[in-house]
Amino acid sequence: MEYTAVFQKMENGWYFAQCEQMPNAVTQGRTIAEAKENLQEVIALLLEIQKEECEARNSGKKLIHRKIAQIAML
């Protein structure tokens, strides 16, 4: 899946980064490249946390897992 990063240069010279599709995914970096790398790590961490929370909520239940295609944004 692809995500869109939004960067904003702050007064202190650092870059604030946020993911449009995951508003809770925020970070910063000294450069855009560093902020992008940090944001990728945050997104991966949040996805892992969401997966673990889903597994915990559904512990003991018989579930069927299927991959789905990427959903196009309108």
Image (tube, helix red, strand yellow):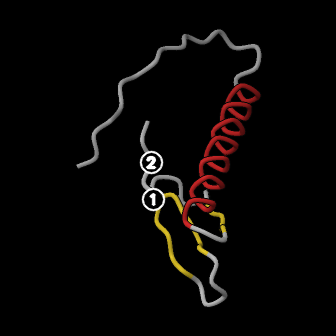
Give how far apart the Cα atoms at labels 2 and 1 are. 7 Å
Q: Disc 2 residue type?
A: Tyr
**Marks 2 & 1, CB-CB < 8 Å contact:** yes
> 57 above or below 65?
below
Residue closer to the observer: 25 or 58: 25
The residue lying furthest to the bottom in this view is 11
Tag 2: Cα neighbours inside 10 Å, few (<14), some, or many (≥20)?
A: few
Q: Which mark is residue 36?
A: none
Tag 1: Cα neighbours inside 10 Å, few (<14), some, or many (≥20)?
A: few
Q: Left or right? Give the position of 68 relative to 31.
A: left
Disc with the residue nearer the chain's start (2 vs 1): 2
Q: Quadrant of the N terminus?
A: top left
Residue named by callout 1: 20
x 76%, y 28%: residue: 56
Hey, which quadrant is residue 39 in on the image?
Answer: bottom right
Residue 46, x across and y down, in percent:
66, 45
Q: Disc 1 residue type?
A: Glu
Residue named by callout 2: 3
